[in-house]
Image (spheres, helix red, strand yellow):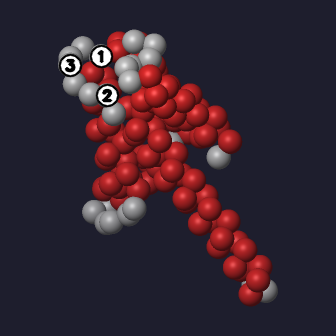
Amino acid sequence: MFWVWLLTLPIILMMAASRAFGAPWPGPFMLRLAMVTLAFPVLFIVGEPLFAVAIEAARARRWHSALPVAALAAIGYLSGLIALVGPTPSLAGPSAILVSLYLTGRYVGLLNGRRSKRARGV
């Protein structure tokens, strides 16, 4: 979880700064480029298990909670790439935040499962 949030924190700070100043900071193109660049390791290196589970679930034609999260994250990242060449909004940053929140929720769920097993004496 350390790496997920360490890599996501600059995205959050840049988004907050652009909202606080009322204009994209450090500039429209640089903000889009930074979001795409910073979102890549969150999505495709640290978040790789999410996409692996989603692809496995799609191939087996079964539902898994990772499936819509991975689809939204991939579409958001693609919008970020398209935003580099066209006047469309970039959702690469929010997609990285979505993946970070999902992975954090899964991690907390695993911790709660371990705690409840210890409490039951299993």
- SS for callout 1: loop
Mark on residue 90? 2
| Amino acid type at mark 3 | Pro
* Residue 95 versus residue 104 in the image, above or below: above
Mark 1 lies on residue: 84
Between residues 35 and 26, which one lies in front from this camera angle? 26
Q: Is residue 77 left or right of residue 101?
A: left
Q: Position of residue 68 (x, y in %)?
A: 33, 54
Q: Nearer the viewer, mark 1 or mark 3?
A: 3
- In the displayed image of the protein, which residue is found farthest to the bottom? 120
| Amino acid type at mark 2 | Ser
Q: At 47% from the left edge and 49% from the top edge, which residue is drawn?
A: 50
Quadrant where the image shows the C terminus: bottom right
Is residue 19 visible in this depiction of the protein?
Answer: yes
Distance from disc 1 to disc 3, alpha carbons, whole Å, reads 8 Å
Q: At 59% from the left edge and 40% from the top edge, which residue is drawn?
A: 4
| Amino acid type at mark 1 | Leu
Disc 1 to disc 3: CB gap under 8 Å: no
- In the displayed image of the protein, which residue is found farthest to the front? 21
Mark 3 lies on residue: 87
